[in-house]
Amino acid sequence: MKYIPNFITSLNLTSGFIAIIYAANGDIVTASWFILAAMIFDFLDGFSARLLKAYSAIGKELDSLADVVSFGVAPGLIIYQLLNDSLSLSAPLDDADGIKTFLIMIIPAIMPVCGALRLAIFNLDTTQSSTFKGLPIPANALSVISVVIAAEYSHSTFFSSFTASPLAMILLTLISSGLMVTRIPLISMKVSNLKLKGNEGRLILAGLVLVSFAFLGFNAAPLIIPFYILSSMIALLF
């Protein structure tokens, strides 16, 4: 039983690796769904560890390594593909325009680097057991795949234009990556009890997400992370 959480973590890593394969081949939509699957496994491994009381140092390190792949490298590669497509570079490594090459090679790399730094800080910071400081790396991945999924399924020209804009993708990368290494207090999604007290932020977030999806459908996907930050700010008032 004690190996179940680590097995689930391995499924997270496997999903992230498959997402990288799809993203490398240009299928960023399928890659986004595999990143979403990795998020589910990431939630389940922690849930099963708490349920079975199967905590281990190896599990903690394995979880961080899997998260870097699934929520740092994989979404970074999606950003790379979007920048590559928007800048119309068929062979970026051979392109004579150094600025374009820099943009599509270096900018996406910021995401996994900040993600790894965020995880390293988290593993050493004993004050983040019930709340987070900085954007969690799965939320970083969600900020990327949400716009990809919205552009694919919402039939909105806004999101199609957004993902096709180099400036928008660069800003998304810099903002999401920067938030990971800030000390902004954010709520943890770990639920220790079903009482209202202490779960205000989580309930507000759930309500905002459910209502927005009911009215906006897939257009609401990119609102999840802003709602998460807003709910965390409100929760601080309680």
Image: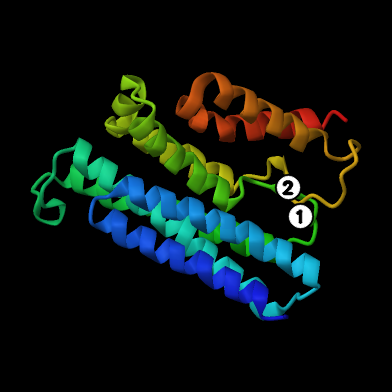
Q: Residue at label 2? A: 188
Circle 2 SS class: loop
* Label placed on residue 128: 1
Q: Residue at x 49, y 68 (%)?
A: 13
Depth check, front residue: 56 or 155: 155
Front residue of this view, candidates 30 and 224: 30
Q: Nearer the viewer, mark 2 or mark 1?
A: 2
- For the residues labelled 2 and 1, the Cα–Cα distance comes to 9 Å
Q: Nearer the viewer, residue 169 or 228?
A: 228
Name which residue lies at 67% across and 28% down. Answer: 230
- State the colouring used for the structure image: rainbow
Q: Quadrant of residue 99?
A: top left
Amino acid type of the residue tagged 2 in the rendering: Ser
- Work out whether 238 lies above or below 141: above
- Amino acid on which disc 1 is placed: Gln
Q: Position of residue 156 (x, y in %)?
A: 35, 22
- Expressed as whole percent of the image width and height from the top left, the position of residue 199 reads 83, 39
Q: Secondary structure at mark 1?
A: loop
